[in-house]
Image (cartoon, helix red, strand yellow):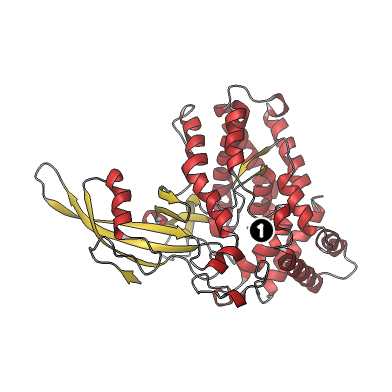
Amino acid sequence: MGVTDTTPGDSACCSNITLETFREIFRDIEPEVQIDAFEEEQGSGRGDNYTATIYRTHLTGQRQSSPDGKKQKWEKNLICKRMPENAQLREAYKSDKLFRNEVLFYTEILPELVRFQEAKTSHVFGATPKCFYARDDILIMEDLRVRNFQMTDRQKGLTLDETHLVLKEVAQFHALSLAYKFENPDHFDRLRELITEGLFCSSNANWYKNYYERLTKDAIKMVSDILPEDSKYLEALKKFAGCSTFFSQMVHLVSAESTLSAICHGDCWVNNFLYRYEYTGTNTEQKRAVDVCLVDFQLIRYSSIALDIANLLFCCTTKAMRDEHLSGFIKLYTSEVFGWLKLLCTKIPEFCDSAEKFSKLFRDELKEYGRFALGLAMDIIPMSTCSSEHAPDMYLNMHHEDIETGAPVLNFPPNDLCRQKMSDIVIDMVDKGML
């Protein structure tokens, strides 16, 4: 942990933010506050984040109250998210592109969408942390732990109530983007043009060649350990992943212009959903999720909304959960989106102007584009099932000789949970006609 004193020029040992920077940020937000010092510590564990470094910051100072002029103790907790300081790390994870996307999300895209929503209703999208400051290399946001939000267990997958909550918030976000597109197509194009595809674009093909060759081979090996060699499921996986066109297929899925293309979160996996719980008994395991916030908008993209939902449903839930609730999840999501469209649109386009039309359209897109989630699963499932000690440490410096020309190939030792989850996703996608 690093500690600063009251000298304006001093900087923290972690995020390299100066005390004067914090003072400037809060001068307009809370002008009656004098910030005296701050402390920092690492804000995420190994395996929780891969494209940025996150620090938790505690500010302390004094607030001058009126009218008596007495000073009271003041403190605030923040999250400081920044690009890796090491140049090789930034290049390895394409952090410049990804960070730019998230800065633009908080400074341009989200404010514009919320202004549009505020003109229609008093209930506006609030399932993101408050952003206090943004520049090319850093974001300073509220620490959601203050409001008792926490990360769920990435190895277990989402519970029923966690899935319902996040589906509703993602549905609202998608509906907001779609409605803005329907109502203000020219302005929407300007927002869309701000976004850079951070991962699946043709210019990245060579950079990720070795990376995805390794991931696809590992995925096929894991599934072949579970399913027989002549299985139709294994054959479908080999057809999708076991060829040189895998990356170009993923590029096509994200870049295809569909009827329901909108601005999407782009990275709907468990670590990017933070939940607030109510505890229903004395045992801390007896809890119910009552609120959710979405974080990490570095991979925002303009694509079919089905990509986000496929990722959420297939990579973040168990097969047992999907077997029992998948149809209900899709019904909940589509009804939420359509309900918001009715509220936000002056006139909904004819192709989706009824709940039935919208539901069919979405289900068609899920079937057409849903296999994208299998491509993501090759990344997400090994990450989400590994133990923390096997995850790369984003806070360690890397040297040039540690990184080859191309994305670093992360080594996650296979485990039984990973093998089963990958196999379950393949089985479900084949059975649902997505693969």
The residue depicted at 72 percent of the width and 31 percent of the height is 357
Q: Amino acid at mark 1?
A: Cys
Q: Residues within 10 Å of mark 1 (few under 14, many from 20)?
A: many
Residue 17 x, y percent position in the rendering? 37, 60
Q: In this picture, is 396 found above or below 106?
A: below
- Which residue reaches farthest left? 68
What number of labels is visible? 1
Q: In this picture, is 127 found above or below 243?
A: above
Q: Is residue 12 left or right of residue 127?
A: left
Residue 60 x, y percent position in the rendering? 25, 59
Q: Is residue 362 left or right of residue 333?
A: right
The quarter of the picture where residue 169 lies is top right
The residue depicted at 58 percent of the width and 42 percent of the height is 194
Q: Nearer the viewer, residue 55 or 204?
A: 204
Q: Nearer the viewer, residue 221 or 106?
A: 106
Q: Secondary structure at mark 1?
A: helix
Q: Nearer the viewer, residue 20 or 231?
A: 20
* One can see residue 215 in this view: yes
* One can see residue 336 in this view: no
Quadrant housing the N terminus: bottom left
- Which residue reaches farthest right? 230
Q: Is residue 182 left or right of residue 69?
A: right
Residue 71 x, y percent position in the rendering? 14, 52
Q: Which residue is mark 1?
A: 315
Residue 223 x, y percent position in the rendering? 78, 69
